[in-house]
Amino acid sequence: MQQYTPNQQNLQAMLSNLNIAGLKTKIIFTLVMIMIFRLCAQLPLFGIDGQNLANLAATNNLIGFLDMFSGGAIGNVSIIALGIGPYITASIIMQLLAVVIPHLEQLQKEEGEAGRRKISQYTRMFTIVIAAIQALVFVVYLLKTSRSAIMPDVNLVAFAIGSIVILTAGSALTMWMAELMTERGIGNGASMLIFCGIISKIPFYAEKTVMLIQEDTSLQLGLLLLLLIFFATMVFIVIMQEAARKVIIVNPRRQVGNKVYGGTNTFIPFKLNPGGVMPIIFAIAILLFPTTILELFGNANISNDVLRNIIVGLSNFLRPSEITYNIIYFLLIFGLTFFYASIIPNLQPKEIATNLKKYGSSIPGIKPGKPTAEALDKILSKTTFIGALGLATIALIPSISCNITGITTLQGIGATSLIIMVGVALDFINQVRTNLLPKNYESFLKQ
């Protein structure tokens, strides 16, 4: 009989756990979709001359910021240059409309899965509309600023029309991949694609930083300090993502025959940051829309001096390096954290209080019904306030630190990227644990 070492036994146990609940299949499917996404990000639009293409990300700060989240797709002028942005924007708008339009609110809350499917269909159609508009803006910007990147024998009208169609289709393809990853893979598909885009740009930023340090060796201490700040930021992000206020729930005892069930205390966890990385992603999507439009008009030949000065002033006002941009960014994250907490189904105080009263459970010292709902609402408001303030503050620290230390080459990997990377990684780990729960229960029952 073959004997296995402890390491071999642990490896076999890990491999067997991967087969539980199709976990291995989900991970493989996620990796395949990521590979397809990365391949599409390297395929340029028809008519683009790769040799004459000046990397847009290197010549424009806004394009460089967008390029980080697309994993180089915009800088390469690829068929999926719009990335997952239109889908995220459409999701934000639909969630906002669901709050103010009674019909959408009814679909979301009262019609169950069928209503959510209808809202998803509306979101997909809205994504196509937004993608077409963004494709038009991107092509016009490309024609005005990077004409040399287009092959000289290409008809510009045909190039513009074809590019708009291809970019819109590429956005629809990205949306489809994201939804498939969410349904059949591990983690949130949209967040995973953004995560992969950020990871793919790290070598580029590392190379730029090395070149900067070689040119000015006095920045070595600043780089060390900045890396320590990044590490501390990641630690605080993990704390923010995992911290929760536990509300004790007393469950009544029930006797069925000779057996007594219940009577044990449980708890409801109210997370400090219930929205995870979504407030960050939403805030970026909201800020980028006016910034992109202003960038387009800023490169246009506007004869009116007053209008041109207004556009230039607004562009400077919303430039990522300006303090005004950071203030708006802070306020957006703070507000969107509250908004996201208010629309999560399992964080509705009235529904929680109704369910507790229905099953005879209660919070110690608080009467069931309306008093319980009011108490839960206060707890949720306090925890969300702390989480929103912490998340918005953390989002600004690394970017400010880059300016103070002089290591401006790492501004692309600021708190926004760190929060998304850490948040998506934690979500991935939590979903893997969730898929492994059946294996743990099976082992428990066999004992």
Image (cartoon, rainbow, N blue to C red):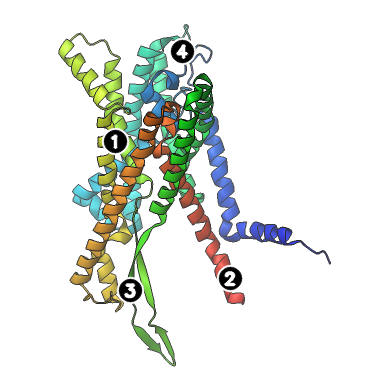
Q: Which residue is drawn at 47% across and 15% down?
A: 54
- Helix, strand or loop under label 3: strand
Residue highlighted by disc 3: 249
Q: Which residue lies furthest to the top in this view?
A: 152
Asked which quadrant contains residue 310, the reply is: top left
Task: Specify which label sits upstream in the sequence, 3 or 1.
Answer: 3
For the N terminus, which image quadrant?
bottom right
Task: Specify which label sits upstream in the sequence, 1 or 2.
Answer: 1
* Residue 370 drawn above or below residue 386: below
Q: How far apart are marks 3 and 1 (CA)?
A: 39 Å
Three-letter code, disc 2 = Glu
Residue highlighted by disc 2: 442
Which is closer to the viewer, label 3 or label 1?
A: 3
* Front in this rendered view, residue 112 or 348: 348
Q: Distance between the residues labelled 4 and 3?
A: 64 Å
- Helix, strand or loop under label 2: helix
Residue highlighted by disc 1: 286
Which is closer to the viewer, label 2 or label 3?
A: 3
Residue 165, horizontal then vertical, whole percent? 40, 25
